Amino acid sequence: MKKSLFGGYVLLLMLTLACAGTRTGTVAGDNFNENEVTSESVTNPVDLTDFLERVSGVTVRGNGANAEIKIRGPISFNGQQKPLFVVNGIKQGYEYANIYNAVNPRDIRRVRVLKNPSETAMYGVQAAAGVIEIYLKEKEDSSK
């Protein structure tokens, strides 16, 4: 009896972990990803936090260059609690102030937040506290 009960718990745990990934789906004919925000869904953004506040599990404290960004869940082994910022595929480090000063919010096409180890694996140990990927519009497209 105890053996089958233990097996049931293990199966339940495996099922829970397998279902804990990113949700995607369709709402009114449009595809969505709960960890992604596009420029179409943010009106007159002041800075990157206007995008990040729309992602579940992301905490924004403060404003301006001094805002503190945290992703719920991931904490690295070395104690790093700040997410890794990546702009158009290039790692920018952990400091939000650098992104605040370098990226015009009107040039942002899409922001994607990676939380799970399976999503952040491509960035290695630097991404242990999560990753915020920022994709910019093409230069001729930034007026939109």
Image: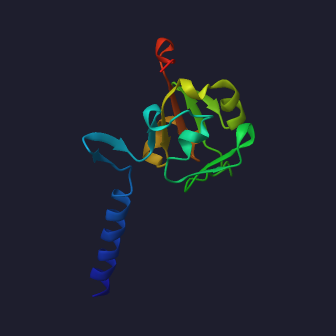
In x, y percent, where is residue 115? Answer: 49, 48
Nearer to the camera, 89 or 68? 68
Q: Residue at x 71, y 38 (%)?
A: 64
**In the picture, which quadrant includes the N terminus?**
bottom left
Name the residue at the bottom extreme: 1
Name the residue at the left extreme: 29
Can you see residue 67? yes
In x, y percent, where is residue 129? Answer: 59, 47
Q: Residue at x 55, y 56 (%)?
A: 73
Above or below 40: residue 60: below
Q: How many marks?
A: 0
Above or below 37: residue 109: above
Nearer to the camera, 30 or 79? 30
Decide if residue 22 is on the left or right side of residue 78: left
Q: Residue at x 27, y 45 (%)?
A: 26
Can you see residue 95? no
* Colour pattern of the rendering: rainbow
